[in-house]
Amino acid sequence: MNNSFINFPAALFLSLPLLTQAGDLEQLLEKGNCPGCDLKGVNLKHADLREANLAGADLRHALLYKATLQNALFN
């Protein structure tokens, strides 16, 4: 049996969280809001997030250096 064929579904399954995270980041950047989003480890340096709704968003290890967060909602 071809081992690369067997591993393809596993590789696709393991990449699904990354695809979801990319969609969440896209939503934040386009709409300025992303409540409940998975933004773990995302680079948001210098991002303008004024008045963004980030309630319940997972921002663990996100890079927020010099991000503008005035009036952003976190809870």
Image (tube, helix red, strand yellow):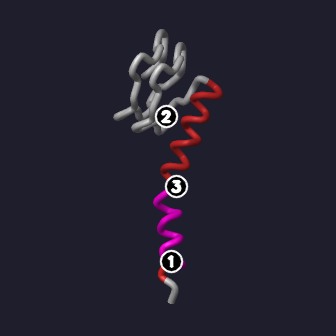
User: Residue pushed farthest top?
Assistant: 70
For numbered disc 2, what is the local secondary structure?
A: loop
In reply to whether residue 7 is colored magenta, the answer given is yes
**Residue at 50% from the left image edge and 36% from the top image edge:** 37
Q: CA distance from mark 1 to mark 3?
A: 18 Å
Report crowding for label 1: few under 14, some 14 to 19, many 20 or more residues within 10 A (C-alpha): few
For numbered disc 1, what is the local secondary structure?
A: helix
User: Residue pushed farthest right?
Assistant: 30
Three-letter code, disc 3: Leu
User: Residue pushed farthest bottom?
Assistant: 1
Asked if labels 3 and 1 touch by Cβ distance under 8 angstroms, the answer is no
* Foreground tag (3 vs 2): 3
- Considering the whole magenta stretch, tell me its main secondary structure: helix
Residue 44's place in the image compared with 24, above or below, is above
Q: Earlier in the sequence, mark 2 or mark 1?
A: 1
Residue 53's place in the image compared with 39, above or below, is above
Judging by the rendered image, the residue that carries numbered circle 3 is 16
**Residue at 45% from the left image edge and 24% from the top image edge:** 45
* Foreground tag (1 vs 3): 1
Judging by the rendered image, the residue that carries numbered circle 2 is 36
For numbered disc 3, what is the local secondary structure?
A: helix
Q: CA distance from mark 2 to mark 1?
A: 35 Å
Magenta stretch: give its range.
4-15
Residue 74 figure quarter: top left
Residue 2 falls left or right of residue 26: left
Estimate the x, y position of residue 12 in percent, counting from the top left.
53, 63
Report crowding for label 2: few under 14, some 14 to 19, many 20 or more residues within 10 A (C-alpha): some
Residue 15's place in the image compared with 64, above or below, is below
Estimate the x, y position of residue 27 in percent, counting from the top left.
61, 33
Three-letter code, disc 2: Gly
Report crowding for label 3: few under 14, some 14 to 19, many 20 or more residues within 10 A (C-alpha): few
Judging by the rendered image, the residue that carries numbered circle 1 is 4
